[in-house]
Every structure is written in structure tokens, then in C-alpha cells.
Image (cartoon, rainbow, N blue to C red):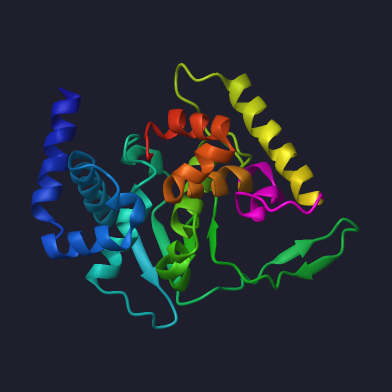
Amino acid sequence: MFNKFRNWRIRRIVARHPIDEPLWQQALQRCAPARRLGASDQAALRVLATLFLVRKSVEPVKDLPLDDADLVLLAANVCVPILKLGMDWYDGWSSIIVYPDAFMPRRPKIDAAGVVHQSDALLAGEAWGRGPVILSWSEVLHGGNRPGHNVVIHEMAHKLDMLNGDANGFPPLHKGMDHHVWSRVFLSAWNHLKNEHHNGIHLPIDPYALESPAEFFAVASEQFFEAPATLHEHLPDVYRQLELFYKQHPL
């Protein structure tokens, strides 16, 4: 009975807040991971994008103009990782804040000596534990021009990672997935890439993945959806674990 009521509510939301066909087709053309999906998966993604736009708020700052086409594009990118997981995986937070360009969070940072500094790093995206996601719109629009890059998917991966605590590269795994295999695969790949990078060897993945296990998971997730063939070729075991986690087969 609950599922019937839930499905009825979803159908009602979609009927009341439809995404216009031209806007959806434009979003598919601008979002490569969505464009590669089959027709039935694109239809499911459209439902999720509709639910996202109804349930979450998008808050542009610094007079950034976002029109309906921009919002639909953002929603399509946001919902790609949860296509087979469902909107419940994005529970616990309510908004996305969008800056025109890279932004500089003004918050104190304590170094190893206990000295407080003001952070001056420019960021393209940021995800807070139970707070908002913050994005640079220029990165949303142009990140896909660089193979394997998608700042929206990166930050959504952090959100999924934090569902069971701090971001640590270990999201809540599904029944049947082996926690030991996940840890072994990701740690082995991370250490291998660090050695390759130290020896001056070009990496098949953004070196930012080496910052931490959390960033490795987020960067690998970007590549899984944006450049799956590259990830499968160079890090097949990581690809397989992400395939199991996201329940998708982007190749």
C-alpha cells in the first residue's frame, strides 16, 4: 500500500510540474552521461529531475541568471548518479548554491601547529555534510569539455559518501557488496596511482583523486559517468565496484 501511495504521489508531482520536452531534449544534448542512456533510463532520469526541482531549492548568488533550461540541465546532472538508487539517497539536505565562477569560502583553517589561517583556496564545488552543495556555474557548463570531469557528479558523490558519516571514500554499500573487496580495490588503486604520480607517469585520472580516499571516490565517480571506457581500461576493478554501487553500466 505504501509503495502504491508513493508512486501515486510521484506521478502527481510529475503531472503538476512537467519538464517541457524542448528543455529536456536540450538538457540531454548538454549532459553527456544522460545523453548516452537508453530511452527508458532517460525517462526515469526525467522523473528524478522533476522531483529534484520540486524538492530542492537552487539558489544563485551574485546576480547569476539561471533560466529554466539551466535548472533542467543542473537537475539532469544531479540525478545521473542516483538513476538506479532513487531520490531518497539525497535526503537530509535541501539546497544547491550556485556561484557564477570559482568561489572562495571564507572560513578559518587550523594548521598542524594549531595556528588559525583564513582559507584562500578557489573552489569549483563543495558539499557539506547535512548542508548545501555549492557549485561554480562556469564549471557546470564547461567541465564536460575536459574528459572525465563533471563537478556536479563529483559533489553528488561526496553527498552519497557522507550518508554513513564523514566523507571517506566508503559510501553505504548495497546488500551483497563486499566491504572488504571495496576497501582492497580502492586502497590498492589509490596507492598504485600515488606511486605512478610520484614517478612522473601520466595518470588516467585527475591527480586530484590522490588528495584523499574521499576525493578518489568522487573523481572516480566523475570518470565512471563521463569517461567510462577510460576508467574501465585503466582501473577495471574500481570500475566494477562503482558499477555495483551505482547499479549502472555506462559502457
Which contiguous range is marked in magenta? 199-214
Give the farthest residue toward the right. Answer: 113
Q: Position of residue 28 (x, y in %)?
A: 25, 57
Vertical order, 80 against 243 (above or below): below
Residue at 11 percent across and 36 percent down: it is: 8
Q: Is residue 58 left or right of residue 103?
A: left
Can residue 14 be seen here? The reply is: yes
Residue drawn 14% across the image and 48% down it: 13
Verify whether residue 159 appears in magenta: no
Magenta-colored stretch includes residue 200: yes
Q: Is residue 20 above or below residue 35?
A: below
Name which quarter of the figure residue 152 lies in.
bottom left
Picture coordinates of residue 203, whole percent (x, y): 66, 50
Q: Is residue 159 visible?
A: no
Kindly give the residue lying farthest to the bottom in the view shown. 63
Residue 183 in the image: state x and y as whole percent.
64, 27
Determine whether, in the image, residue 71 is placed left or right of residue 232.
Answer: left
* Location of residue 12 in the rendering, given as x and y in whole percent from the top left corner: 10, 45
Q: Quadrant of the C terminus?
A: top left
| Of residues 189 and 11, the one drawn nearer to the viewer in this rendering | 189
Location of the N terminus (image quadrant): top left
- Which residue ends up furthest to the top in the rendered image? 176
At a point 39% along the width and 54% down the height, the residue shown is 94
Q: Residue at x 26, y 74 (%)?
A: 67
Q: Is residue 210 above or below residue 173?
A: below
Q: Quadrant of residue 186?
A: top right
Give whichever of 236, 116 is nearer the camera: 236
